[in-house]
Image: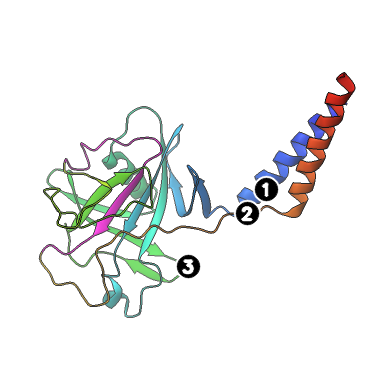
Amino acid sequence: MRKTILRTVVAVFFVLGTIVGAHAAAYNFNGYWIDVEAWAGEGENETILVVDWNRLDQEANGKDIVSESHAFGFRWDGTAYESDMLTAFNDAGILTVTTSYGGDFIDNIGYWDEEDNEVHMHIEEGSWNLASTDDPNNYWGGLDWAGWTGDPTEWDFNTAGITAELLEDGLFEGINAIMYYGTWPDYADDQLTIPFAEPVPVPAAIWLLGSGLVGLIGVRRKSRN
């Protein structure tokens, strides 16, 4: 009976692993399904970076932007800063990141969205807001360099620069394009948009395997009585 139960458990996890691999874009991060474009780094700790260009690059693309924001996953061990994460994405060829002031602040972030055939790049270098949260449903608000806002935010604003901002396992990191000097186009906005994904469906076959496993465990328990 023990061998039968073990084989059933292995079969269930094999099917689950196959399903997750087939839907790699949809990732369950601490209970939230996020459409993750790519991963960089290795380790026990995880964070999800969301970069929102707020459609400011729409004119440069010569068409309406399909996806104004994209999410990227980063893993690490020990201590890592936001700059380490961005360097990893840049070195992996996932993002093109340029910085200034000795690498403390972001100039620009570029990304080629192959699926939608869009190139994301800010039209005003250096104009970004950065913050973190454990809840992607929190309101972004109207952040600025000083952390003051007339539009209260529920995110934790980063005022220290990317080389001083420590990453924390399980948090979302947001980088949002704004306009410090230019004028907002009518089609743009200043709010960070999380690219939520649809939950990965669990086929009926898995539920049947799961039901069979529960049934076998129930049989085993009864046999002990």
Viewer-side residue, 221 vs 47: 221
The type of residue carrying mark 3 is Glu
Q: Residue at x 41, y 51 (%)?
A: 72
Report the span colored magenta.
Answer: 160-180
Callout 3 environment at 10 Å: few (<14), some (14 to 19), or many (20+)? few
Q: Residues within 10 Å of mark 2 (few under 14, many from 20)?
A: few
Q: Within the image, what quadrant is residue 53 found in?
A: bottom left
Q: Secondary structure at mark 2?
A: helix
Q: Which mark is residue 22?
A: 2
86 sits to left or right of 2:
left
Residue 21 in the image: state x and y as whole percent: 61, 49
Does the residue at mark 3 contact the one at mark 2 (Cβ under 8 Å)?
no
x and y, in percent, of residue 131 in the image: 26, 47
Query: Type of residue at label 2?
Result: Ala
Q: Nearer the viewer, residue 134 or 20?
A: 134
* Residue lying at the far top of the rendered structure: 224
Q: Main secondary structure of the magenta part?
A: loop
Q: Tags 2 and 1 in contact by the CB under 8 Å rule?
A: yes
| Residue 61 position within the rendered picture, expressed as x and y whole percent measured from the top left | 32, 75
Q: Secondary structure at mark 3?
A: loop
Identify residue for label 1.
Answer: 18
* Disc number for residue 115: 3
Q: Is residue 53 left or right of residue 147?
A: right
Q: Is residue 173 magenta?
A: yes
Do the residues under discs 1 and 3 have CB atoms within 8 angstroms?
no
Q: Is residue 42 left or right of residue 216?
A: left
Q: Amino acid at mark 1?
A: Thr
Task: Give the residue furthest to the bottom.
Answer: 62
Identify the residue at image location x=40%, y=30%: 77
Mark sitting earlier along the chain (3/2): 2
Dot 1 lies on which element? helix
